Image (spheres, rainbow, N blue to C red):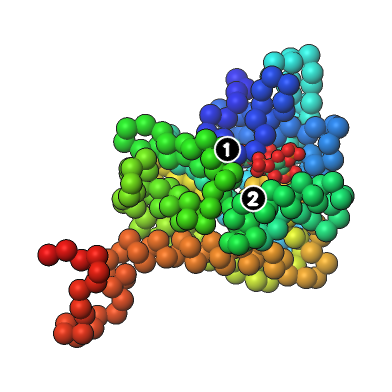
Amino acid sequence: MLQRPEHQVAGHEAGSGTLGPLIDGSGNFYKPLNPSDERGAHELAFYTSFYSDTQVPQSIRSSFFPSFGGTRILPVPDSPDLLLPHLVLGDLLHAYSYPCVMDVKMGARTWYPSASEKDFAKYWKKDLESTTPLLGFRISGLQVHHESGRWKPYRDKVRKYTVTDVRQSLRQFVSKNPDKTPPDCALASSVYGGSNGILAQLLQLKSWFEDQTLFHFYSTSLLIAYDKGGKAAQVKLIDFAHVMKGEGIIDHNFLGGLCSFIKWVSEILTDSDPEAAAGPAEPEATVGPTENETH
Ligand SMILES: Nc1ncnc2c1ncn2[C@@H]1O[C@H](COP(=O)(O)OP(=O)(O)OP(=O)(O)O)[C@@H](O)[C@H]1O
Ligand SMILES: O=P(O)(O)O[C@@H]1[C@H](O)[C@H](O)[C@@H](OP(=O)(O)O)[C@H](OP(=O)(O)O)[C@H]1O
């Protein structure tokens, strides 16, 4: 049965009078193609071209992008007489019981070169109100399932996140007590670290972006997820409504944001690993107490 995705953390939501994604519980995520809006058609064109481009390594497609199964006509919730084509994508959270999810919109700017004056003004304003220009990314939404429930900050709050809030959220995302101060970062090494962890996947993605000149991914997000307790961490790209042809030029907007994001994640790993945080072992006599140390 079609339903609204319970674990959606950002973007347009299906509701009375608004279009949003649906899932079928069998592994498919359906994103509506609004006929009165060119964004849907643009995203469909991207998926079609991306999945047929022989220059894209198969390993990149399968590791970092949702699967794509064309389009399907479906009824719109609350308006069952209205039928609309939807993108058929793999539901990235299908295998999870209690998904912990973060949507990170990438790039130091989300407006794209061909944007109209009106669109440029809209995206520029949103960028300036967020960490986008400063950090090269912003958090658009997140949720964490922890021992005593689900922690999901309100969207209006996330929209106003400062650099300090981002630092805190990246820690909360891998904590068993995300709603407490300070968050414990108990899952940092199992989610962000390790050979299959988020950091390793981000570095693999970065090496493709250091080379690929096929596409420029404006306003695209990283969807980062794991199952409660720290299992099955994954990084995927979503939202391709504003992807442009790369024309032989590196996507420095996305790549710069990715490098910045990698640095932020790496720092959490270093901080939450006491040995790494202490740096290389030094002769005991040279290590003095820090200001925060209590005896
Ligand atoms: N393939 C997928 N599988 C599972 N969840 C997904 C998938 N794609 C998107 N989502 C969820 O839906 C949200 C919105 O996705 P997306 O960014 O594609 O939609 P949008 O309406 O175009 O967003 P925006 O308003 O940011 O442009 C994501 O934050 C994520 O929670
Ligand atoms: O992050 P927020 O604050 O929710 O703002 C939305 C975000 O910038 C989306 O990327 C954008 O949709 P597209 O990327 O698909 O253009 C959407 O435009 P919209 O309001 O015109 O739908 C904005 O409202």
| Residue drawn at x 12%, y 65% as measured from the top left | 295
Q: Are marks 2 and 1 in contact (CB under 8 Å)?
A: no
> Could you say where residue 188 lies in the image, as x and y percent from the top left?
37, 55
Task: Report which quarter residue 35 is drawn in.
Answer: top right
> Could you say where residue 250 lies in the image, as x and y percent from the top left?
73, 70
| Residue drawn at x 23%, y 83% as measured from the top left | 282
Residues 161 and 47: in front is: 161
Q: Dot 2: what SS? A: loop
Q: Is residue 87 above or below residue 192?
A: above
Indicate which disc residue 90 carries: none
Badge 2, how many Cα within 10 Å: few under 14, some, many 20+? some
Q: Quadrant of ligand 2?
A: top right
| Residue drawn at x 74%, y 15% as measured from the top left | 79
Q: Amino acid at mark 1?
A: Asp
Q: CA distance from mark 2 to mark 1?
A: 12 Å
Residues 210 and 89: in front is: 210
Q: Amino acid at mark 2?
A: Glu
Task: Report which quarter residue 229 is drawn in.
Answer: top left
Q: Dot 1: what SS? A: helix
> Could you say where residue 262 lies in the image, as x and y percent from the top left?
51, 64
Question: Which of pointers 2 and 1 lies earlier in the amino acid sequence?
Answer: 2
44 on left or right of 141: right
Q: Is residue 260 above or below residue 180?
A: below
> Could you say where residue 151 lies in the image, as x and y percent from the top left?
42, 36
Query: Taking the image as drawn, is residue 64 in sight?
Result: no
Residue with the mark numbered 2 = 129
Quadrant into which the N terminus falls:
top right
Residue with the mark numbered 1 = 156
